[in-house]
Image (cartoon, helix red, strand yellow):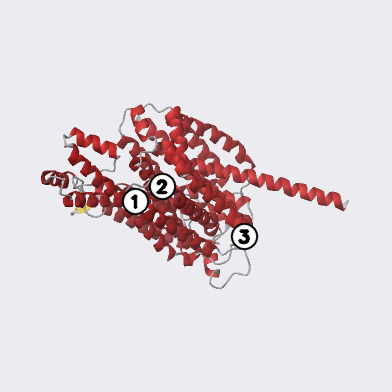
Amino acid sequence: MAKKTAAGTKVAAGAAKAGAGLILFTLAAGQFLMTLDTSVMNVSIATVAKDLGTTVTGVQTAITLYTLVMASLMVLGGKIGSIIGRKRAFSIGCIIYGCGSMTTALAPNLTVLIIGWSFLEGIGAVLIMPAIVGLVAGNFPPGARAKAYGLIAAAGAIAVAVGPVIGGFMTTYFSWRYVFAGEVIIVIAILFLARRAADDPVGVKPKLDLIGAVISSAGLALIVLGVLKSSTWGWFLPKEGAASLFGLSLTIWFIIGGLFCLWLFLRWQTRLERAGKEPLISPALLRVRQLSGGLITFLFQFLIQAGLFFIVPLFLSVVLGLSPMATGVRLLPLSLSLLLAAVGVPKLFPKASPRRVVRIGMLALIAGILVLIASLQVGADSSIVFVPMLIIGFGIGALASQLGNVTVSSVPTEKSSEVGGLQNTASQLGASIGTALAGSILIAALTASFLAGIEQNPNVPQQMKDQANTSLSAGAPFISQSDAQAQLDKAGVPKDVSSEVIKEYNKSQIAGLRTALSILALMGVIALFFTGRIPRKQPGSEPASADDEPAARPEPALA
């Protein structure tokens, strides 16, 4: 009888493990899908613009709006999940997202594309992504969450890496529309599998703080929009022909306005909490040392990650002229090492210090960037990215294996959806800043290097030097050498002169890429100063050190 009982217990445990694995796969598939869109679209911009009868700028506007919707509404999405239940928010988000994907697949023009992709899919994502964080907390015990969060974060990062391959293949051989049609099928499958996920019952349903939602959304939207438009407007001083206010770029005014709105938001939340009402985000959450450390590190991770996924494809596709598919293949080593680190670290070192793992991950990111900078020379081929991608992938995977668990474990489980909103807001804000920062630094360095290069080149006529200084005052475009040669030929520049200009332009491209990478490495060094907020002990392990105890538990106001 005892043997039968033991056997039954073993079978039940195996079934529970299989069920947990299916839930984890479902949530990871959701995270993969949420991240896939942008990386797929980035390699298909020209084709999409042609199909819809619009311009590249029009499609880039749709991409910008998608990021804007997610970053500005993510906190609200997390709160809605807390009110209606995370599983229900996840399901509703999937339905909205699926409708957006179908609308995008059938879009006849840019307006419909923006409605389907930027808004419907964006709104679906703000419900799904915070709910994923909460559902992991509700379906996995504390000891298993680090691995679960690592796999889910890895799924998102892998989507960024393989997106160009998928987008390049589908756009080249079929149509970009099939990507979004395929997403509808995946969403239906996710909805079917998500029924197995457990969710804590919703207790008393508080009223939604609409005033706080409007103020916070406005603040985040202003910051993200300002950062995203920095390449057009300029960071501090306005670019040639760009609008300005009191002699300063609109970028800085948007960021200042956004920060002021966020200050108003926090004051409003404190007032609601003191009055005994339900705030959108409890100010006490942001005073939790462990949570704030995790959020800041998330922001820097995604800032660096987004910058890299902007710069490296530019080198491969524009400088070297590789196809979208070949570019995506060169990024696959990153996916491999990322997945191995995200899964392997929690499995092989379950009791490893989160602070140590996070620092090692950030140091690996910095080291990979430095190796890439050292290898990036004029005449370098695509093989130089292999080793840096492996190192960088390990760094991202190590960070992914810890940060999700660090942030969510810092508060009670019922607050996990709100933390999910904050976590994804930090991620989207970091990604927006990373892309904009890398782009603006790249163009500024390219322009300065190119103008200095042709100025010092005796084979370039003075008239052309003067013309370049005038026409490129707002920034030199980052284009392929063949496109640059075509423009010079169209302008009637003699071959001997154009070859010298192309040579200087190629040197300037490499200088711009290396400068932008240097800024990302600097961001990684700055991030190290905030890792002291990450706990030394794994969440849930005992005993915790006195240094970590204040970080691990929120203030009484959260109870």
Report if the CB atoms under discs 1 and 2 are less than 8 Å apart.
no
- Residue 413, how many percent across, how many down? 58, 56
Q: Label 2: which residue?
A: 309
Q: Position of residue 370 (x, y in %)?
A: 40, 57
Placement of the C terminus among the 4 image quadrants: bottom right
Under tag 3, what secondary structure?
Answer: loop
Q: Count all numbered tags in the image, as a single digit.
A: 3
Q: For residue 113, which quarter of the picture?
A: top left
Q: Residue at x 21, y 44 (%)?
A: 500
Q: Tell me the kind of residue under disc 2.
A: Phe
Helix, strand or loop status at disc 1: loop
Mark 3 or mark 2, earlier in chain: 2
Q: Nearer the viewer, mark 1 or mark 3?
A: 1
Q: Residue furthest right?
A: 1
Kind of residue at disc 3: Pro
Picture coordinates of residue 15 (x, y %)?
72, 45
In primary-sequence order, the first of circles 1 and 3 is 3
Q: Residue at x 25, y 45 (%)?
A: 503
> Mark 1 packing: few (<14 Cα in 10 Å), some, or many (20+)?
some
Do the residues bearing badges 1 and 3 touch, measured as CB atoms within 8 Å?
no
Q: The residue under label 1 is which amino acid type?
A: Gln
**For this rendering, which residue is in front, 336 or 423?**
336
Looking at the rendered image, the disc whose residue lies closer to the viewer, 3 or 2, is 2
Query: Nearest the camera: 310 or 535?
Result: 310
Return the residue at label 1: 377
Q: Residues within 10 Å of mark 2 (few under 14, many from 20)?
A: some
Most foreground residue, 232 or 497: 497
Residue 205 in view of the camera: no
Alpha carbon of mark 3 to alpha carbon of mark 2: how far?
A: 30 Å
